[in-house]
Amino acid sequence: MMKGLITEKEFQKGEVVGVIRASRFVRNYVQSHKDINVETIKEIHEEIFKDIWPDIAGKYRKENLKIKHSGLLLPHFSEVPKLMDTLDFELKNKLEQLEISEGIIIGEGDSKSEKAFDEIEKVVRLSAWIHHKITFIHPFREGNGRTARLTGNLILERFGLVGISVKVEKENKNRYCNALSQVDKFEDYEPLVQLISEGLIDRYNGVELKYYNQSVAS
């Protein structure tokens, strides 16, 4: 099955199935000891599209694209491999910089809470960073946003947090796009970090929050 040979409704249905499969892939990957790198990102994308559009699944785009209703000029397709290699190098360094320590329970009166919150903020900021990098480079023909959100969740979950649902529908779409645009224009990650933080708060509402570093979670 591939795009062009199926109806739009069938494609959308297949895409939903692919996202569910990719989410399961992320959960399983979290439990592995494998490194998180650009090959992981390509695997996530492949899980989404391998049934409905195998020609693009896990493969870098071979054409130039424009984002609707956006003035952002995407990188030329010929620049994508080099940009992703740079991302791979930077991601490795950022993962290594996250402090390795034992799991910390965050609770009232816990002397380690402040340190734990600092570590959680680092994880959230790394999730925001990789999220934006993928949407900015736009390495794939289709599904860059979904791949970015799933990769962001992979970062959160690898370090013991939970995956979230970044709301990009209806009235939330403008806020999401503006948050990404804020990074593009001013390198200001705060709006995107806020979105991810709100997603975590929603998921942890009424649940004791724990932080586990990579050495524990992986």
Image (cartoon, rainbow, N blue to C red):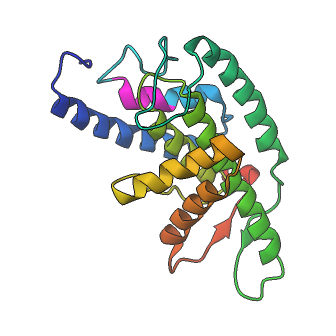
Give the position of the N terminus as an image quadrant: top left
Secondary structure of the magenta portion, mostly?
helix
Q: Which residue is depicted at the point 61% across and 53% down?
A: 156
- x and y, in percent, of residue 69 in the image: 42, 38
Q: Specify whether residue 49 is painted magenta.
A: yes
Viewer can see residue 17:
yes
Name the residue located 18 percent from the left edge and 16 percent from the top edge: 5
Residue lying furthest bottom: 109
In the image, 60 versus 75, the foreground residue is: 75
Left or right, residue 98 beside residue 165: right
Whole-percent x, y for residue 12 in the image: 24, 35
Looking at the image, residue 200 lies above or below residue 85: below
Residue 29 placement: quadrant: top right
Q: In the displayed structure, does residue 160 sit left or right of residue 117?
A: left
Q: Measured from the top left, where is residue 168 in percent x and y?
A: 41, 52
Residue occupying image coordinates x 78% and y 83%: 110
In front here: 104 or 113? Answer: 113
Residue at point 41% right, 52% down?
173
The mark tally for this picture is 0
The one nearer the camera, 132 or 151, is: 132
The answer to which quarter of the image holds residue 38 is top right
Relative to 53, residue 71 above or below: below
Q: Is residue 139 magenta?
A: no
Magenta segment: 44-50
Whether residue 28 is visible here, answered yes or no, is: no
Picture quadrant of residue 109: bottom right
> Looking at the picture, how far across and down is residue 182, in whole percent?
62, 49
On screen, 59 above or below 205? Answer: above
Q: Nearer the viewer, residue 98 or 193?
A: 193
